[in-house]
Amino acid sequence: MEEAASYEEPRWPPSAEQREPQPMTPSSNAEPVSGRLPRRRLLGLAGIGLGAAGLVAGGVALEQFWQHSHSTAAQADQQLIGHLLRRAGFGAGPEELALYRNLGFAAAVDRLLHYQQVPDDEMEQRLAALKLNLDHPQDQQRWWLLRMAWTQRPLLEKMTLFWHGVLTSSFRKVGGPRFYRRMIIQNQFLREHAFDTFDSILLGITSDPAMLFYLDLTKSTRNTPNENYARELMELFTIGLGHYTQQDVTEGAAALSGWHVRGFSSYYNPATHSDRIKHFLGHSGNLDYRDVISILASHPAAPWFLARKLFSFFVYENPSQEDLQPLVTAYQQSNHNIGAVMRALLLSPQFASEKAYRSRLKSPVEFAVGAYRALGLQDDGSLLPQFTTLMGQTLFDPPNVGGWPGDKVSAFWLNSGTWMTRLNYVDLLLRRGLGRGVAHPLNLQSLIEKNRIASPEAFVDYFAAFLLDGQLAGDRRDLLVSYLTAPARGRQESVTFANGKSYPLSRVRGALYLLLASPEYQLN
């Protein structure tokens, strides 16, 4: 992987004006607890009513929640590392944030990219102990969601998620229930080659059993090649519309013939490959699948096509040619190495810019895994797949070969139904956890004692520090503290702070709920 010629530590955050979102009232079951603060005021505090129109304009989130004039160097660093770990992972709790902040930004990027140097044995052991059935789609989803939540290699899992949304397949078309495991085989391939050359990734996905079945390449014969994979390979995977013709589809399909699936593996049979002369994208000869991949990965449109997908997913939508040029250059100079492209992306000024900060709405996976990970939940995550599906993202089952629309335009992730599901998810996460059977709620008393949190103000600041990059307007902070300290109805369990004062558990838990339901927390 090539080193960047030079690197300047980015200034963070850039100057911006603070703006408050306009709340609207949702259905009544969204409020975690009753209290003395006016209901509409509380809902405004939580940012309820975060419709796509309210948070996002033209597909780009515009909310800014910090003021440069009041930022200390430590706060600026905290925001930049928080931004990095949300985009190049799924967010982080206090200890992980401290680890990466101590490294500094450039070294933090190196740690994320050079994931092989970071042990992840504990995660593998925890997953193995669950004894999940990887022949069942919901257990497959749970296995991957918990990988994202528990991993010490967050960028590796984020890249795997990116590739899953680009080089798509679905368990609904892999040959039936007996062959659902083909999706895990594909997932492991995408993980193992996440930062490989684009050529190697394309060669591997072309011969992947799930993909062969999903896009009908197994139906190809030398005399009647199936065109589905050839068309999607060009349109959605490599160069995009406008760079090929129907003849290229026909000729590419012939060149790609010869692949077959047997059980959980694939094989190439030259006898079923069309050995006629093909004319594909300006190249002629007895071309086969290796030639097709080499031609596409080297096509002038390929680095721009791939750079746009990566930039839109990891930075912000609608990038300019100037935004994409460093990624394209890295692709060309590294012989198509994705690790080099990602390094250029993460160290680009655009990644650390005001325009990128909280510019995308969190996907269901990012939201659900991020909250679970940041809070350090210890249950078995049994309900994670159910909630990400209800929020609009079912792993191993993208809506079509084009992947999830929200990966391109994040506003598509949110509507009134998915927003209420997010609120219900946060409520359940805090009240009982996500395991089935015995409840395992977040132990707030233990957390307060461990971190010696001395007051309601300190409690709000502690969670805002890693959930919101420490960016919480003073009036909203005051509302949260007032809410937490207001009397609750009836007798109930209490939580005692380090100053010796006790407050109702429902109030303490409710204050955390409101932070997780805030507009800032919905934005990535």
Image (cartoon, rainbow, N blue to C red):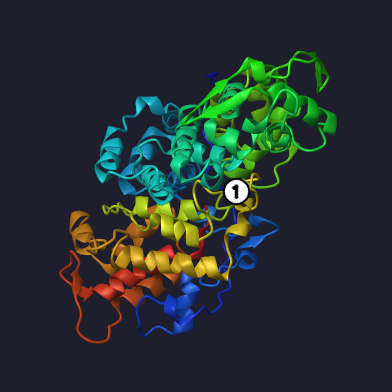
Judged from this view, the residue extending furthest toward the top is: 285
Task: Decide which of 342, 171 is in the foreground and name it.
Answer: 171
Residue bearing mark 1: 354
Q: Residues within 10 Å of mark 1 (few under 14, many from 20)?
A: some
How many marks the image carries: the answer is 1
- Could you tell me which residue is drawn at 27 percent across and 83 percent down? 487
Does any portion of residue 121 appear in the rendered image? yes
For label 1, the SS is loop
Question: How far across and how far down the image is residue 47, in percent?
Answer: 51, 70
- Could you tell me which residue is drawn at 39 percent across and 59 percent down? 464
Question: How far across and how far down the image is residue 161, in percent?
Answer: 51, 41
Q: What amino acid is found at the position of numbered circle 1 in the picture?
A: Glu
- Could you tell me which residue is drawn at 60 percent across and 63 percent down? 55
Query: In the rendered view, would you say 119 is above or below 319?
Result: above
Task: Decide which of 231, 476 is in the foreground and name it.
Answer: 231
**Residue 483 is drawn in which quadrant?**
bottom left
**Residue 17 is drawn in which quadrant?**
bottom right
State left or right for residue 450 relative to residue 147.
left
Query: In the rendered view, would you say 23 is above or below 291?
Result: below
Query: In the rendered view, would you say 342 is above or below 74?
Result: above
Question: How far across and how far down the image is residue 373, in percent?
Answer: 36, 50
Question: How far across and how far down the image is residue 186, in percent?
Answer: 49, 34
Query: In the rendered view, would you say 516 is above or below 338?
Result: below
Does any portion of residue 245 appear in the rendered image? no
Judged from this view, the residue extending furthest toward the left is: 500
Task: Decide which of 175, 383 is in the foreground and name it.
Answer: 175
State left or right for residue 494 relative to residue 341.
left
